[in-house]
Amino acid sequence: MPYRSVNPATGEVVKTYDNHSDAELEAALATAHSIYEAGCSRGPIQQRLEVRIAATKIGGDPTDESVGLGRLCSVSARDDIAAQVERAVKAGATLHYGGSVIEGPGAFFEPTILTDISRDNPAYFEEFFGPVAQIYFVRDDDEIVGLANDSHYGLSGAILSSDVDRAKTLASRIETGSVRINTSSYTAPDLPFVGVKRSGYGRELSEYGIKELVNQKMVHVAEGGSSRWPRFQPLLHTPTPERTSI
């Protein structure tokens, strides 16, 4: 049975799983913000996610590799997440796990699982900057693409699948600035980074990022010394003197 995970609120994580192995399931649990699972009301991803969350060590020495969840960046950020979850539940979402502030020093929030999030629920379009997983159930690739692209955001996505050709086809349909296949995160100086929709504009890294820091000048040479309709030569990219230090 295929299962897929996507974050329709941000467009930043888009994953699809088919003929799944234990390794793929673990990768999904480690990286997905929102999950789409096909064909059943409570499948293996949700079950394993609940088990994994229950066993997660929260707080402690951040250099301790046994710590699975740290604090949020501020108390106000924690309170914002709590308010988002409360709004989502009031609008009809089902709370399966967590959903509360962890009292005590530090800005901690329980890892949380939400399902039954309809399009008119504010959580459907909001970004959650905290430990909140949204689980959706879909029927096929067309539905997953429709849900993933029904977003105000489009930073980056990822697809995990044993069928790479299918993953490539799916990636071509996802409206994000970048899509990674069989990895959730990767970057290098020669790979451009960009968002679409409300996730930004312009480019970082690679030759495309360099061109964001220069003025592009067009120079043309008329054949025969003069011509009413000259043929244009390729663009010349001339650095702006005051912006050449990178």
Image (cartoon, rainbow, N blue to C red):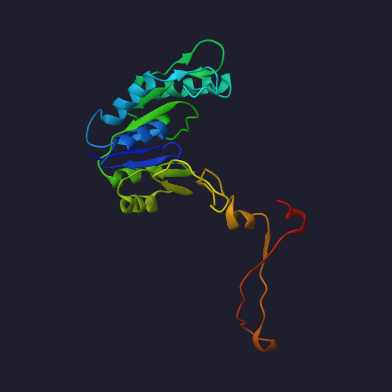
* Residue in the foreground of this view, choosing between 190 and 43: 190
Left or right: 188 in relation to 212: left
Residue 13 pos. (x, y %): 43, 39
Name which quarter of the figure residue 231 lies in: bottom right
* Residue in the foreground of this view, choosing between 207 and 227: 207
Residue at position x 56%, y 12% in the image:
105
Residue 1 pos. (x, y %): 22, 39
Name which quarter of the figure residue 146 lies in: top left
Residue at position x 44%, y 16% in the image:
100
Count the marks: 0
Seen as rendered, the residue at the extreme top is 104
Residue at position x 25%, y 42% in the image:
19
* Residue in the foreground of this view, choosing between 192 and 65: 65
Relative to 88, is 191 above or below? below
Answer yes or no: is residue 94 visible.
no
Seen as rendered, the residue at the extreme bottom is 224
Residue 216 pos. (x, y %): 66, 63
Residue 70 pos. (x, y %): 51, 22
Relative to 22, is 219 above or below? below
Residue at position x 56%, y 16% in the image:
106
* Residue in the foreground of this view, choosing between 240 and 83: 240
Answer yes or no: is residue 73 visible.
yes
